[in-house]
Amino acid sequence: MESWTRLSTSLSNIDFGASANKLAKGFNSSVQATRERLGTVAPEEITELPQEYRDLEARVDALKAAHVALLKITTVYSTENYDYPVVIAENITELSTTIGVGINNLASTSLKGTNLPAPTEIAPPAQIHKTLPHALGRSATTAANAIKATNSGAEDKLGKALTLYAEGWDKISTARVQHDITVRDQFLHPWQQTLSTSINVAVKARQAVRVSRLELDAAKQTLKNASPAKQEQARIEVENAEDDLVQKTEVAITLMKTVLENPEPLKNLNELAKAQLLYFSAAAESLSGIQGEVEELSVAAEGEYRKSRDH
């Protein structure tokens, strides 16, 4: 009996009238949207939103499209290996090494304090940056060492040039790591944040306006077809729907203006361009610093080659 009393009390607290009214509004709005989509509603029966609102809609759509277009490309900066040529093969090697180190160190920790001999803990391997500049530097170093290993200490112009080339790309590698960090922190994250927060908030406010407008036009249709006994209630529903649309439109206009006036996207784009400028400037400076020396070695080698041919 007590359970039935609690159930009765809970049921009495539910406003079935409000719930039914909300469901009816939702159904009428869906019907109105379907009729508009099928073209069975006369243009004059669709409430026209203010021109200012429609202009702001177009500008917000353009701002959103701009963010999406640039993110399609710049999201590659979220991972370091976007230009790395041999990532798959090295990943397999690194994975086996990491697993081996992990098993060894786990065993070392687990066997401490027991009578069993514990293996010595191994330091994890140093981080291998996976970028094209790092790959070029490492490959040039490997090539230089291969040349030097066969010359018994004698100077080899190609080996020296390869060493210079490796040194140049080592400097570029450092600049590349800094470039990626800056782009992620100063451009990519805030650019994505603007899209997922302020722009989307404005878009949701516009969706609320659309729903409110559909409810208003559905209410107008109900009033148009209402019997004399229901005319007054239907008229009240239209007035309430008009007030709701005005309020939601004003909110949406304010939010869209806020998004469009926000200087952050322009600031973020400037940070992207600045990071790229610093990186390419560092690359140009490093390569120009070694290119002259490599050219001297090249000219000297060509001269020696021609001289040997003349004899």
Image (spheres, rainbow, N blue to C red):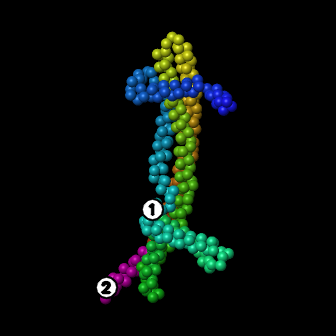
| Residue 49 visible to the viewer | no
On screen, residue 196 above or below 221: below
In reply to whether residue 177 is colored magenta, the answer given is no
Say few, some or many: other residues with alpha carbon within 10 Å of mark 1 (under 14 / 14 to 19 / 20 or more). Answer: some
Mark 1 element type: loop
Mark 2 element type: helix
- Please give the residue where the numbered disc 2 appears in the rendered image: 309
- The residue sitting at the top extreme is 228
Between 223 and 204, the one lying in front of the other is 223
Q: Quadrant of residue 156?
A: bottom left
Between 18 and 261, the one lying in front of the other is 18
Distance CA(mark 2)–CA(mark 1): 43 Å
Residue at image point 45% right, 73% down: 139
| Residue 189 visible to the viewer | yes
On screen, residue 215 above or below 198: above
Between 85 and 111, the one lying in front of the other is 111
Q: Quadrant of the N terminus?
A: top right
Residue at image point 65% right, 79% down: 115
- The residue sitting at the left extreme is 310
Q: Quadrant of the C terminus?
A: bottom left
Residue at image point 61% right, 26% down: 15
